[in-house]
Amino acid sequence: MEQTEQHPLIGKRVEFQTDITSFGTGQVIAVDLATERVRVIDAEGQRWNGNMDQIEDVSLGHGRMIVGSTVISARIYTEDQQ
């Protein structure tokens, strides 16, 4: 995988989908623009590889909650962002 250090995703905290109802979080460590794939490392040091469309930037407080089998996305604002 080509590591593109200048890509804006490098270093971002993201949420990634591991299966239909499971998600993990980690930091983007590599981006391959030719294949639109990313590599993410989580807090335990586990690496995940996947497509760019399987990740969501959560560094600004955007998160996801699962209720039953329904996925709900929400943006969390701090006082200075409102």
Image: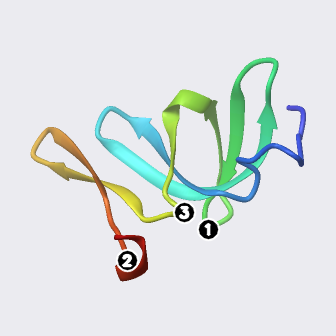
Residue at the far left: name it.
68
Nearest to the eye among marks 1 and 2: give it.
2
Q: Work out whether mark 1 precedes mark 2 in sequence or the reverse, and give the earlier one.
A: 1
Quadrant occupied by the N terminus: top right
Label 1: few (<14), some or many (≥20) within 10 Å?
few
Nearest to the eye among marks 3 and 1: give it.
3
Label 3: few (<14), some or many (≥20) within 10 Å?
few
- The alpha-carbon separation of the residues under discs 3 and 1 comes to 18 Å
Mark 1 lies on residue = 44
- The alpha-carbon separation of the residues under discs 1 and 2 comes to 28 Å
Mark sitting on residue 78: 2
Mark sitting on residue 1: none
Of the residues shown, which amino acid type is indicated by label 1? Glu
Q: Secondary structure at mark 3?
A: loop
Q: Secondary structure at mark 1?
A: loop
Please say if 30 is above or below 63.
above
- The alpha-carbon separation of the residues under discs 2 and 3 comes to 13 Å
The residue at 53%/28% (across/down) is: 53
Of the residues shown, which amino acid type is indicated by label 3? Ser
- Say whether marks 1 and 2 touch (CB < 8 Å): no
- Say whether marks 3 and 1 touch (CB < 8 Å): no
Residue at the far top: name it.
34
Quadrant occupied by the C terminus: bottom left
Of the residues shown, which amino acid type is indicated by label 2? Thr
The residue at 81%/43% (across/down) is: 7
Mark sitting on residue 59: 3
- Give x and y (percent) for residue 26: 59, 58
Label 2: few (<14), some or many (≥20) within 10 Å?
few
Colour scheme in use: rainbow
Please say if 21 is above or below 45.
above
